[in-house]
Image: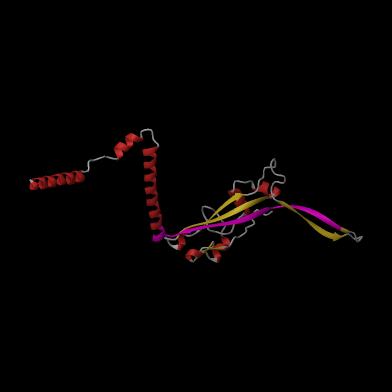
Amino acid sequence: MSYDKLPSVILALQFLLFSLSRRNILPNINSTYLKNCKYNAKTDPFCPIFRLRDMVEAAAQDFQEMAIEGGVMGLQINWNCDLDKAASHCVPKYTFRRIDNKDSAHTVSPGYNFRFANYYKTPDGVDSRTLIKAYGIRFDIMVFGKAGKFDIIPTMINIGSGLALFGVATVLCDVIVLYFMKKRYYYREKKYKYVEDYELEANASYGSQSESHVFHGDR
């Protein structure tokens, strides 16, 4: 296997809700750059051309071992876009990880391999076949995208829901404290203050004075 094999990954992503399309080839990348660039997390993080050894080593794996026994590598491409900013800030991020289980103690056939047959006839006219077991590295490309933009309507709904939850929490706390706590009578005395109904007393006093005037009139 050639260590300098450079596969390229070119794809597009659409955020239908926001009518936004993005490609992993950024607008400022030209054909001259693509002919010469190689992905590097520090120097060329947006180059879509990858070196196999670099991809495997980025996943903390031994490339020589994987080249012999095979394996399955995952190339994850993540878009995490804040659309309140310019669209140029919506760029992909590449990460790599090994997907298959290389532990031979818990796996029947570690690595990645498959079998195929070549069918042919011998010079004597006998039908024959050669069964070949091939090892290799398979790459699974996984694309994840998340985009968000400020909207006043969901914000107000969330604020209203939060305020409603605070109200429910207050009522629930009152029920627990006033009816289930050991010192509920103490809390009840502190929460509620019983006062005289001065308005009823004033009405009662006014009625007594009226009855007194009627009595004097009869005399």
Quarter holding the C terminus is top left
Name the residue at 67% across, 48% down.
66
- What main secondary structure does the magenta stretch of the protein show? strand
Image x and y of residue 140, in percent: 63, 55
Q: Is residue 144 magenta?
A: yes
Query: Is residue 168 found left or right of 36 in the rendered image?
Result: left
Image x and y of residue 153, in percent: 40, 60
Image x and y of residue 114, in percent: 73, 53
Name the residue at 53% across, 53% down.
41
Query: Is residue 30 found left or right of 197 in the rendered image?
Result: right
Q: 141 or 165: which is nearer to us? A: 165
Image x and y of residue 185, in percent: 34, 35
Query: Is residue 115 found left or right of 4 in the rendered image?
Result: right
Q: In the image, which residues are magenta? A: 128-155
Please give the count of numbered marks on the rendered protein: 0
> Relative to 103, does residue 47 appear above or below in the rendering?
below
Name the residue at 63% across, 49% down.
99
Find the residue positioned furthest to the right: 124
Q: Can you tell which quarter of the image residue 183 is in?
A: top left
